[in-house]
Amino acid sequence: MNSVSPSYANAELQAHEHRTNHAFVDAANSAHNAAEIARSEGDVDSWWNMTFLEAENLLDAEDFEACAALASSLVAGSRSAAKAETQAQAFILLAKARQGGGLLEEAADAAREAVALVAGENDMEVNVKARQALIAALADSGRLDEAWTESLALADAIEAEVDDQLVGKGYWVIGNVAFLCNKVQEGLKYHELAAATLSPARNLDIWAKFNKASAAMRLAADVADADTLRCIERAELATDVIGGTSNDYLLMKLNRGHWNYLAGDFVAAIELLEAVCNDADKPLPQILGEACLLLGRAHSSMGHHDEAREHLLNAAEHFEAAGAQQRADQAREFLAAED
């Protein structure tokens, strides 16, 4: 391996500093510069690492199309790599980018490639991440039986793991699928295990994302108790401290709207949910689908049946655009009840 040049070292340092500060676009640009320097110097390992870092930052910046394109190039470039973990990491990134872009079938395909590559390998972290990516794509696309089967396999895989953050992330995704499968008690159990193992002191960003996601799952299961409210408040507080993406703030607004709906405060729910639907940053189809579904149900509860039909139809269309056919079918069931 070639010695590291000062220009490469500076670009790499800038990329990591920007990422630490959640300036993901700047981090991606600096990583791209570092990758180009490494390429010109013939340092293949550093080029791959910096290109991967660029793609990770594009994912966090929610530029899913650009991330998917770069991840695809990494997949092609890692085909001949000696380590299966390297190839799997590229496929995991590709799966996440495709899921973010609403291409759920393609996301599941990429994640399956990753799982197959690391089956039986010693790198438990990559193994768990690959299974998480597969479970998330299957669950989002409504293939819940497959997602639950994979979740049980993940539970077995993390049984002997000692890294609390890794175990916590595993419990988190298993709980998500349990909720989606209407296994509410198992969902609560696994999310409580995740809360007990994830550490806000170690990673406040992950803590914020977990509490936001756990609140959403609890609300979807009509669990509007004190623990759910604590999840909402923890997510809001942590995100106020570290900042978040536009989708982070939209999802928290969606959670508050859902909470108000379940509490019977339909006027407050409608105000928040309409703000999500009308957001200038064009939320992802999955988010729009959930917001429209709740809007339709809130209007229905107030006897506004024309508005309810309009929003429920929009919800079905958004879910179908995201490839979430099961959720689209649920929206159409509510729509049929309005006729």
Image (tube, rainbow, N blue to C red):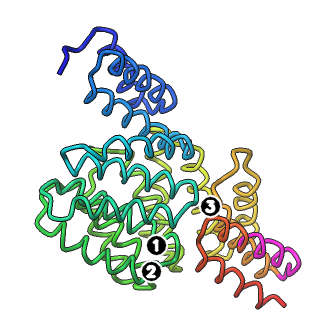
Task: Say if residue 265 shows up in the picture.
Answer: no
Report the magenta stretch's main SS: helix
The residue at 45%/39% (across/down) is 241
Say the numbered circle drawn on residue 185: none
Please name whichever residue, 94 or 226, is drawn nearer the observer in this view of the structure: 94
Q: Do the residues labelled 2 and 1 touch (CB within 8 Å)?
A: yes
The quarter of the displayed image where residue 211 is located: bottom left
The quarter of the displayed image where residue 204 is located: top left
Left or right: 64 in relation to 321: left
Left or right: 58 in relation to 281: left
Gap between marks 2 and 1 measured at Cα: 5 Å
In the rendered structure, which disc, 2 or 1, sits on the residue that comes first in sequence? 1
Residue at the front extreme of this rendering:
80
Q: What element carries label 2?
A: helix
Magenta-drawn segment = 303-315
Q: Label 3 crowding class (10 Å Cα cut-off): few <14, some 14-19, many 20+? A: many
Quadrant of the snapshot with the N terminus: top left
Left or right: 161 in relation to 5: left
Query: How far across and how far down the image is residue 182, in percent?
Result: 45, 85
> Pointer 3: what residue?
287
Residue at the right extreme of this rendering:
306
Looking at the image, is 95 positioned above or below residue 144? above
Q: Tell me if residue 316 is in the magenta stretch.
A: no
The residue at 85%/74% (across/down) is 307
> Pointer 2: what residue?
144
Count of numbered circles on the image:
3
In the rendered structure, which disc, 3 or 1, sits on the residue that comes first in sequence? 1
Query: How far across and how far down the image is residue 39, in percent?
Result: 35, 21
> Pointer 1: what residue?
139
Q: Are marks 3 and 2 in contact (CB under 8 Å)?
A: no
